[in-house]
Image (cartoon, grey):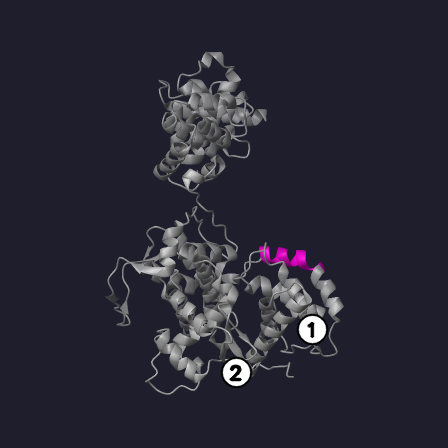
């Protein structure tokens, strides 16, 4: 049985890989050994595409290269779920030995098993530290604000409107057990292909030219490989058979599995037959960058022109100094990924008429490109798999105070007011809710800007309870901000407060103003209602032991329009530094 393949043996390799994957899956079930046939497929792809192509001989060094070098650069799997891959590798080598497919000269299966189990932690760490898309995302992505998942009914309606799901369900019905016989190369029979082109409306034209294989029909080929990747159907003993487990998934879960598989399959299809090995990771990198941009505009989408600009910028980033041929190849690959996301229903064109392109003369969609309600969870998962944080925005009525406070750093003033107002309105006890929000905003792990934001929101949206909510925190980690607010609102008489404590509270307040709005805001707050521009406040403040005093005094000294006040601030700053 052939187990060794060269670069020219593409068809033979893939046919043998599928046979081994199927036999390995059966072996895992029969022996109760943990493992995943898909992980074994990755291992075989690496051995054929990057090593010697000998599937029957494995060394510890090769396993290390696969796990700690190739996988972190190539595999889209979050660290928390990828720890199974080393165990699948060990199981696959044991399977080869158990079925007499392992050739002499390699490491013993027991040595592979021991090394894989010992390498799990290092592997998970490597997957977490190394972005799998390499140079294409080295510069990082702009921060993505919290994303609100569309309501389930909107997601379901969107899923039901996506043609690929109807086609995949129809394919599964057509391949109900005992399934459909495949060709020796693992492709659909010609008669089945002709039937499915019409039944599934794949868009392939059977009247133009002849075809010798179902692989010659691009629409059917794409659907066929997506179905295999998503587990809708599987090759089993020379037949294509529907997978019963897929049929039990709810519609939204089934779609998300299909969409993720479709993106992965597209990257492999667009890798130019292995001529440029890195282009599959480039395809995933473009998908990540595009979807991250869409997540930053989940409600409105982005103008079609911006998508073109993003594509151009991406090509310049990943192909600097490359030949025109390579640059065009990367651009073509990027647009193919965009088309794939549109075909899968992750993205859609909205609010635009088709427009002719002045450069190429073709008709391009106008308007905007946006995530569909079904595509939002898919985009979140793909961007997270690439190692980037995508916070989820909770529904106000269902959120706790901590989740609401987490939004403070991400939303604009108006949107944040609406969110907090909706949350307060949904709480059964408004006073208790105000107390919870104050406690969370002013907790020790929250920064001063978050604390001040919480105080301001409570004063604006829960004015009848704000004093009761804030008083318990006068001695807390953000007590200076609470003190200054209570004094400013005439709730506390400043004469009743120890002068040093009062001054420290003012510096807290001015430091937040500096962090939020810059030096000009510090000057405005200091001068507010003070006939001398705040000069009297600076007298003696240099004695205060406060970590932000230098920043505040420097801002006043360099930006206050009154030269006397600015000079007093600079003098106070010099004294404070000398004292320190």
Query: Relative to the observer, which residue lies in front, 188 or 488?
Result: 188
State which region is magenta: 118-129
Graded by Cα atoms within 10 Å as few (under 14), some (14 to 19) or many (20 or more), the crowding at tag 2 reads some
Name the residue located 64 percent from the left edge and 81 percent from the top edge.
Answer: 3
Name the residue located 47 percent from the left edge and 39 percent from the top edge.
Answer: 403
Is residue 198 highlighted in magenta? no
Q: Which mark is residue 232?
A: none
Residue 472 visible in the shown view: yes
Q: Secondary structure at mark 1?
A: loop
The residue labelled by disc 2 is 185
Residue 35, given in percent of the width and then of the height, sits at: 64, 64
The residue labelled by disc 1 is 58
Name the residue located 47 percent from the left edge and 47 percent from the top edge.
Answer: 391
Compared across the picture, whether 166 is left or right of 15 comes to left
Residue reaching furthest to the top: 495
Q: Quadrant of the N terminus?
A: bottom right
The answer to whether residue 127 is above or below residue 361 is: above
Graded by Cα atoms within 10 Å as few (under 14), some (14 to 19) or many (20 or more), the crowding at tag 1 reads many
Residue 321, given in percent of the width and then of the height, sits at: 45, 68
Which quadrant holds residue 117? Answer: bottom right
Compared across the picture, whether 187 is left or right of 46 comes to left
Residue 414, given in percent of the width and then of the height, sits at: 34, 37
In terms of sequence position, does the residue under pointer 1 or pointer 2 come before the other?
1
Which quadrant holds residue 37? Answer: bottom right
Name the residue located 40 percent from the left edge and 56 percent from the top edge.
Answer: 374
């Amino acid at each position: 049985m052939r187990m060794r393949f060269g670069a020219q043996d593409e068809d033979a390799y893939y046919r043998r890989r599928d046979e081994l994957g199927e036999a390995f899956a059966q072996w895992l079930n029969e022996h109760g050994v943990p493992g995943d046939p898909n992980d074994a497929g990755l291992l075989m792809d690496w051995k054929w595409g990057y090593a010697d192509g000998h599937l029957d001989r494995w060394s510890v060094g090769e396993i290390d290269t696969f796990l700690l070098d190739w996988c972190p650069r190539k595999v889209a799997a979050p660290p928390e779920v990828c720890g199974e891959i080393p165990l699948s590798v060990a199981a696959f080598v044991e399977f080869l030995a158990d079925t007499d497919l392992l050739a002499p000269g390699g490491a013993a299966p027991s040595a592979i098993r021991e090394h894989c189990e010992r390498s799990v932690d290092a592997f998970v760490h490597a997957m977490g530290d190394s972005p799998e898309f390499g140079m294409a995302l080295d510069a990082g992505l702009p921060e993505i604000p919290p994303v609100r998942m569309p309501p389930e009914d909107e997601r379901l309606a969107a899923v039901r409107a996506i043609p690929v799901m109807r086609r995949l369900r129809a394919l599964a019905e057509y391949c109900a057990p005992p399934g459909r016989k495949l060709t020796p190369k693992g492709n659909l029979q010609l008669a089945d292909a002709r039937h499915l082109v019409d039944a599934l409306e794949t868009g392939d034209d059977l009247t133009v030219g002849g075809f010798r294989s179902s692989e010659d029909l691009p629409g059917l080929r794409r659907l066929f490989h997506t179905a295999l990747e998503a587990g809708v159907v599987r090759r089993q003993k020379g037949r294509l058979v529907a997978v019963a487990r897929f049929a039990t998934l709810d519609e939204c879960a089934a779609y998300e599995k299909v969409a993720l598989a479709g993106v992965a399959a597209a990257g492999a299809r667009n890798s130019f037959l292995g001529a440029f090995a890195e282009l599959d990771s480039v395809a995933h990198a473009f998908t990540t960058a595009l979807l991250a941009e869409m997540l930053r505009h989940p409600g409105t989408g982005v103008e079609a022109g911006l998508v073109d600009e993003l594509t151009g910028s991406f090509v310049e980033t990943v192909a600097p100094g490359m030949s025109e041929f390579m640059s065009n190849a990367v651009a073509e690959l990027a647009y193919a990924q965009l088309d794939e996301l549109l075909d899968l229903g992750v993205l859609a064109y909205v609010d635009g008429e088709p427009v002719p392109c002045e450069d190429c003369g073709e008709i391009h969609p106008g308007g905007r490109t946006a995530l569909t309600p079904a595509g939002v969870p898919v985009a979140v998962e793909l961007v997270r798999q690439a190692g980037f944080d995508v916070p989820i925005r909770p529904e106000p009525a269902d959120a706790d105070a901590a989740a609401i406070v987490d939004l403070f750093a991400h939303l604009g003033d108006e949107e944040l007011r609406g969110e907090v107002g909706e949350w307060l309105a949904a709480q059964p006890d408004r006073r208790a809710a105000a107390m919870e929000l104050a406690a969370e905003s002013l907790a020790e792990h929250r920064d001063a800007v978050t604390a001040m934001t919480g105080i301001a929101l409570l004063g604006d949206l829960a004015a009848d309870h704000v004093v009761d909510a804030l008083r318990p925190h006068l001695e807390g980690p953000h007590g200076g901000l609470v003190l200054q607010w209570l004094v400013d609102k005439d709730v506390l008489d400043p004469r009743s407060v120890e002068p040093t404590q009062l001054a420290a509270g003012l510096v807290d307040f001015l430091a937040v103003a500096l962090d939020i709005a810059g030096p000009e805001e510090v000057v405005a707050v200091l001068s507010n209602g003070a006939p001398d521009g705040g000069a009297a406040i600076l007298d003696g403040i240099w004695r205060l032991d406060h970590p932000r005093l230098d920043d505040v005094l420097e801002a006043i000294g360099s930006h206050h329009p009154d030269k006397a006040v600015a000079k007093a601030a600079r003098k106070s700053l010099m004294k404070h530094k000398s004292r320190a």
